[in-house]
């Protein structure tokens, strides 16, 4: 049992980790250009995730439903579903990323860009949305592969993308080996190229498949919408979109609170948030594995097996949280110094890293239980607890601690801790009460 869980969970965790490393890598490599460059790249983070919301909702439905087909031994049904999810993703992403390119400057201004960051952040955002269109298609293929239990394939595509990103960051940010020195724009081009590489590898895994469950076909029959499947998909995807919407809206309010503290505070926040996201990506990997294993267990009509898988994944995520948080506390100053040489950034960032470490168990638990509930089709509960914890309570708590108690940046991060504690407690209680069984 543990081996089955680990074989699926660890590749999924590493895949999510390497996706998260794109933002962290860009932040680290542009930090040499100054805190304004770090802030400019950071301002694009929330708009980028907002545009990705519908795609992630599609992917939740893809993983949950394909895992059911695989658990029931219906590979043909899984293949038909994959083609339809890809078609939906292509239509949605083409529309969204066109809007993102067209209104890039407006996005940056709404997110709090000031005179010293709006130009750089707009240029960076317009380039990365071009790469995100193909990345969205690759992410949907990977979501389908995860549902089929092929997490190693998805992991490999993202490892390759990150290596590509790092290499071209080095060449284009700093102007090495005869390449032009493009700074922040170079980081954006490198990110877009990495997205393209990830997409090509993902396509290859289904276009030239020889042994896996999923294969890409050009026949119209595979691309024709199955209305019965779409009804099941709609129920899961709408709530999953609600979860993404509440998460992004909450983060938008959260970022606005920080943006008012000034460029230095926002730059410090962005470095720490990228580190928190880096940690969170690992826990998202466990959530992905939880969704796939829960779906496969239920598809095989083994609710008892699905529950056992879920518990093992949650415990494994707790262990991982402890392993990650210890060095983060011990080496907090060294970690911050790798991103900035400014003493205030290192000092305040070190305190923030301690808060992130304190939140690691609740972050891991809330992510894992959310993945379990998605696999059971109970995305409504995940959306509701995300709304209360992330959209409503976290911004309120952060604003009170930041401005009313005068804790500034530290108060914002204590709100971060409170938000994850609330979400963890709520999702854990819901799972243990068995409310998810009604959605099966």
Image (cartoon, grey):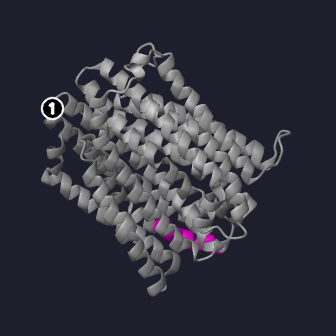
Q: Residue 46: percent from the left, percent from the top?
A: 53, 58
Query: Looking at this rendering, what residue extends furthest in the right direction?
Result: 178
Residue 27 painted magenta: no
Using residue 61 as the reference point, say whether residue 409 is left or right of it: right
Q: Is residue 413 above or below residue 437?
A: below
Q: Is residue 407 visible?
A: yes
Relative depth, front residue between 2 and 382: 382
Tell me the residue at 46%/19% (across/down): 216
Q: Is residue 75 above or below residue 305?
A: above
Residue drawn at the location 70% of the way across and 39% of the way down: 167
Task: Please state the extent of the stretch shown in magenta in the rendering.
Answer: 344-354
Q: Position of residue 380 (x, y in %)?
A: 26, 52
User: Hey, which quadrant is residue 376 in on the image?
Assistant: top left
Quadrant occupied by the N terminus:
top left
The residue at the far top in this view is 210
Residue sitting at 40 percent across and 47 percent down?
284
**Residue 119 x, y percent position in the rendering:** 73, 61
Q: Quadrant of residue 307?
A: top left
Give the camera-side residue of 264 and 258: 258
SS for dot 1? loop
Residue 345 within the magenta-colored segment of the rendering: yes
Main SS, magenta residues: helix
* Residue carrying label 1: 302
């Amino acid at each position: 049992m543990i081996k089955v869980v680990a074989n699926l969970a660890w590749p999924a965790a590493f895949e999510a980790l390497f996706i998260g490393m794109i933002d962290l890598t860009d932040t680290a490599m542009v930090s040499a250009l100054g805190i304004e460059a770090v802030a400019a790249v950071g301002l694009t983070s929330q708009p980028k995730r907002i545009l990705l919301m519908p795609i992630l909702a599609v992917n939740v439905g893809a993983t949950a439903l394909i895992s059911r087909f695989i658990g029931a031994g219906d590979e043909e049904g899984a293949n038909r579903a994959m083609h339809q999810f890809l078609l939906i993703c292509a239509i949605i992403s083409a529309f969204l990323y066109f809007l993102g390119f067209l209104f890039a400057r407006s996005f940056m201004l709404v997110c709090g860009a000031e005179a010293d960051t709006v130009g750089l952040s707009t240029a960076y955002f317009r380039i990365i949305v071009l790469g995100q269109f193909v990345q969205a298609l690759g992410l949907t293929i990977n979501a389908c592969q995860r549902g089929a239990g092929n997490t190693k394939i998805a992991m490999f595509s993202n490892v390759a993308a990150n290596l590509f990103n790092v290499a071209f960051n080095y060449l284009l940010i700093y102007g090495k080996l005869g390449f032009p020195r493009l700074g922040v724009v170079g980081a954006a081009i490198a990110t877009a190229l990495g997205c393209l590489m990830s997409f090509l590898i993902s396509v290859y895994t289904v276009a030239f498949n020889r042994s896996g469950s999923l294969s890409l076909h050009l026949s119209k029959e595979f691309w024709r919408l199955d209305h019965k499947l779409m009804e099941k998909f709609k129920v899961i995807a709408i709530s999953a979109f609600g979860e993404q919407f509440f998460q992004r809206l909450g983060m938008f309010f959260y970022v606005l609170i920080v943006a008012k503290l000034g460029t230095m505070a926002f730059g410090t926040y962005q470095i720490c948030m990228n580190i928190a996201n880096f940690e969170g990506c690992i826990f998202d990997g466990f959530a992905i594995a939880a969704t796939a294993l829960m779906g496969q267990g239920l598809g095989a009509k083994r609710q008892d097996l699905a529950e056992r898988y879920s518990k093992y994944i949650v415990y494994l995520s707790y262990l991982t949280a402890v392993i990650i948080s210890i060095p983060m506390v011990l080496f907090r100053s060294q970690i911050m110094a790798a991103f900035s040489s400014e003493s205030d950034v290192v000092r305040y960032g070190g305190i923030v890293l301690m808060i992130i470490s304190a939140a690691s168990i609740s972050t891991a638990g809330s992510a894992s239980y959310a993945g379990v509930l998605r696999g059971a089709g109970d995305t409504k509960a995940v959306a509701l607890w995300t709304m209360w914890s992330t959209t409503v309570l976290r911004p309120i708590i952060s604003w009170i601690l930041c401005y009313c108690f005068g804790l500034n940046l530290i108060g914002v991060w204590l709100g971060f801790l409170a938000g994850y504690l609330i979400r963890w407690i709520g999702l854990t209680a819901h799972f243990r009460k068995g409310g998810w069984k009604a959605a099966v």
